[in-house]
Amino acid sequence: MINDVSALTYDQRSAEVAAGLNVPVVLMHHQGPPEVMQEDPRYDDVLVEVYLWLEERIGASVEAGVRREQILIDPGFGFGKNVAHNLELMNGLALFHSLGCPLVVGASRKRTIGALSCESPANRRLGGSIAFALKAVEQGVQIVRVHDVFETVQALRIWRGMRDQALTPRI
């Protein structure tokens, strides 16, 4: 799998290499070069702009020879986005399903969790990371990237058990 934080934009040869390898490719949204992307990120409508950018990158990748069924998309939490942008994306993840590619979310231990939890350091953001993972899966995200695998899987199993029980008709 290729997990490219640039969505195959940082190196003009990357799409060709990805196409040649015929492996899954995660196209992640970012705004600006890494060294300045967090200085003052701005969007008129973060959901629409990230959506359209990912749609364009999917098209460019397919045109370069990457098989569409090998493409996964990631809205890029924390990559050229402030806390408000990240929250808007998290609350609107379901929109991205209409792009027709599996959705990946990597919000584990991100700065937004720290900002929402009294500036907790990264190693103290487990609860917030699990909350983001649950919110993402609730909206149909197929893959969550996490640091704390055991705890996140446990939380997701408990959440799914509660959800499935609630859907079971009583006889």
Image (spheres, rainbow, N blue to C red):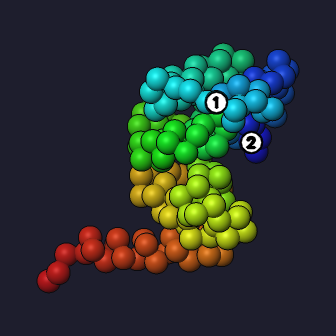
Amino acid type of disc 1? Asp
* Residue at the image position 50 percent from the left and 42 percent from the top: 84
**How many neighbours does mark 1 have within 10 angstroms: few (below 14), some (14-19), or many (20 or more)?**
few
- From where the camera sits, is residue 59 visible? yes
Circle 2: element type: strand
Quadrant of the image occupied by residue 93: top left
Residue identifier under label 2: 3
Image side of residue 73 versus residue 45, left or right = right
Q: Amino acid at mark 2?
A: Asn
Measured from the top left, where is residue 63 in percent x and y? 66, 16
Residue 119 position within the rendered picture, expressed as x and y whole percent measured from the top left: 63, 61
Disc nearest the viewer among 1 and 2: 1
Residue 40 circle label: 1
* Quarter where residue 118 is shown: bottom right
In the image, residue 25 sits, relative to residue 107, either above or below, namely above
Q: Is residue 108 visible?
A: no
